[in-house]
Amino acid sequence: DSGVTQTPKHLITATGQRVTLRCSPRSGDLSVYWYQQSLDQGLQFLIQYYNGEERAKGNILERFSAQQFPDLHSELNLSSLELGDSALYFCASSVDGMLTYEQYFGPGTRLTVT
Amino acid sequence: AQSVAQPEDQVNVAEGNPLTVKCTYSVSGNPYLFWYVQYPNRGLQFLLKYITGDNLVKGSYGFEAEFNKSQTSFHLKKPSALVSDSALYFCAVRGRNFNKFYFGSGTKLNVKP
């Protein structure tokens, strides 16, 4: 168990809908990362937050947004969903400082868009 | 542009034999390097990292990796493979001057009894 929790574990929804994925980082970690993993595109970095502020942005679509709250949990919002958004979404957390950058991953949320 | 390459989609090894999973990177400056393992339907698990110091780093489950600056490589190794090592392995890099992580495409390791 990495200490990172993600809810829900599975999500099935229809095209055009909006969903919210939730992540709670390991105790003491200030940094949260979001990734998308699909069969044909490997692991794609979406966005990183550090202590409530956006720190780095990857290949995140405009239909997607995220935030990190004062208690350090994070939410990834996916809107106007398309079939191609079906994937595993991972959250990871890290200390991200003091030469400690390794990330600890949650179990993921499997999103199926029908 | 920063990138990480895992040139082999799949590596097949017999149990008890040594294994190597290859990783090369292209990052400006000196990088931080990582290996992760992913079992089916699970999140990635951190195996080991190179930050500074000794080029040979040891990690979890008997794995080790060697940082080679001249060849810009960070290959994952294990002296004696186990069937339970069969999984998907990812190499990742983070630059010292930027925050993004770059992951390789993953290498599927198959260890046969």
Image (cartoon, coloured by chain):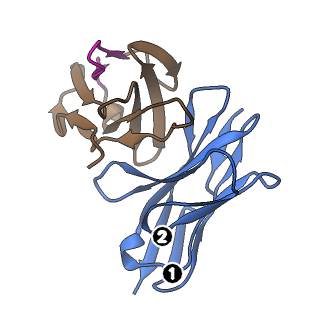
Chain colours: A brown, B blue
Q: Amino acid at mark 2?
A: Gly
Q: Position of residue B92 (x, y in %)?
A: 56, 45
Q: State which region is magenta.
A: A64-81
Does residue B48 belong to the magenta stretch?
no
Name the one closer to the observer, B59 or B45: B59
- The residue located at (70%, 57%) in the rendering is B55
- The residue located at (45%, 24%) in the rendering is A47
Q: Is residue A113 visible?
A: no
A43 in relation to A56, above or below = below
Mark 2 element type = helix
Q: Is disc 1 on the same chain as disc 2?
A: yes
Q: Quadrant of residue A20?
A: top left
Name the one closer to the observer, B109 or A95: A95
Residue extending farthest right: B70
State the residue position of label 1: B80
Give me the C-alpha separation between circle 2 and circle 1.
9 Å
Tell whether label 1 touches label 2 (CB within 8 Å). yes
Q: Position of residue B32 (x, y in %)?
A: 63, 41
Q: Quadrant of residue A99?
A: top right
> What's the mark number on residue B62?
2
N-terminal-most mark, 2 or 1: 2
**Pointer 2 chain:** B
Mark 1 element type = loop
Q: Position of residue B105 (x, y in %)?
A: 54, 50
Does residue A66 belong to the magenta stretch?
yes
* Relative side of B47 to B65, left or right: left
**Pointer 1 chain:** B
B103 in relation to A76, above or below = below
Q: Amino acid at mark 1?
A: Ser
In which quadrant will I find the C terminus of chain A? top left
Name the one closer to the observer, A17 or A36: A36
Q: Position of residue B96 (x, y in %)?
A: 66, 32
